[in-house]
Amino acid sequence: MKNVKTLPSHLNFFNRDLLLGVMETKNNYTIPVLKKGKTWHVEYYFNGIRYRLSEGINRIKDLTKREKEAEDLLLNITKDLEDGFNPEKPDEYILKLFGENISLDKAISKFLEYHKKLGSRKKSIQSYASKLKYLNLFFKGISLKMITTNDLENYFFHKINVTETIVYVDDCGITKTIKTVKWSQKTVKGAKAVFIAFFNWSLKKKYIDINPFNSFDKLIKSKKETEEKHVPFSDEDAKAIMEQLDKTDKLGALFCRFIYGTCVRPSELRKIQLKHINIESKTMRIPFSCYEKY
């Protein structure tokens, strides 16, 4: 059953049957109707205020075309109102429909700034900046919302299989050249972690409606072998180092033995106090205040 508003007293002198057609309401607005007179327009009331829109239909001389455009206008206005459009606050509706149409470049800048304010580790921020920099160079000038899962998969395939030279202009207007190498599986895993964090953050900020990484193909991998850059000391190497330190730097030797024997980080060991070490149980406690974020 249609809800019919009681007519305001100042409208009672109008034809009541005609007005009831206009004043049929849903929520806080009347159902839009198409008015055809000397000029054509779509008319509705919102919070008691009358709105008339023609959107250029009166400039159309062909009546068949004008009729079609007028019906489309009526349909669009009706749908917008049903979806929550408020003519008193049109910007809110546009933001609801499209969100902030932020560029990839700007979103990356905001993401990095967020982590700086959050106090994330410098090394983590550098890793984010590096991986996202190449993503931005690949999709230069694109809107963040336009990036799809297929786009990201193609990007990974490209980085895994192609060695290239990239020429770009930085924020200071300086032309720079970067020669890239094919991604190893270690780099692929690192990039995935960075992109997942970035797109999750973008989703939380409502810059995107869905995370394109949610349906990313997990089978995409690199066959390139990772070169080992960090090779641990052998027992013989460690023994030789300790013997030399015992002769030249006894405190340094003690420091290195703690690191070698417990795998504690140097920055954490520097904050350890005697009360944190139990000689009898041969254990060492690292308080949270000494813990290094990683």
Image (spheres, rainbow, N blue to C red):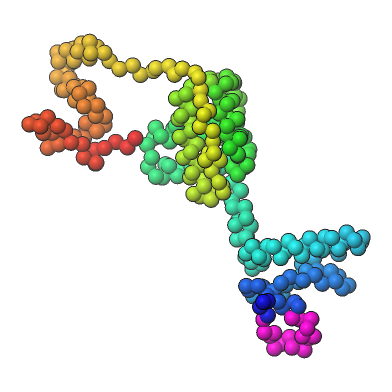
Vertical arrangement, residue 100 with respect to residue 227, above or below: below
Q: Position of residue 171 (x, y in %)?
A: 56, 35
- Most extreme residue toward the left is 280
- Give x and y (percent) for residue 223: 50, 19
Q: Give the position of the N terminus as an image quadrant.
A: bottom right
Q: Would residue 80 appear left or right of 108 to someone viewing this image? A: right
In the image: residue 260, left or right of residue 280: right
Whether residue 5 is visible to the viewer of this picture, yes or no, is yes
Say which quarter of the image contains residue 154.
Answer: top right
Q: Is residue 165 magenta?
A: no
Q: Can residue 175 be seen by looking at this rendering?
A: no
Front residue of 27 and 244:
27
Q: Which region is colored magenta? A: 5-20
Q: Is residue 238 left or right of residue 62?
A: left
Q: Residue at x 51, y 25 (%)?
A: 221
The residue shown at (54%, 33%) is 217
The residue sitting at the front extreme is 1
Q: How many marks?
A: 0
Q: Is residue 11 magenta?
A: yes
Residue at 16% of width from left, 12% of height from top?
A: 243
In percent of width and height, residue 2 lies at 68, 76
Quarter location, residue 148: top right
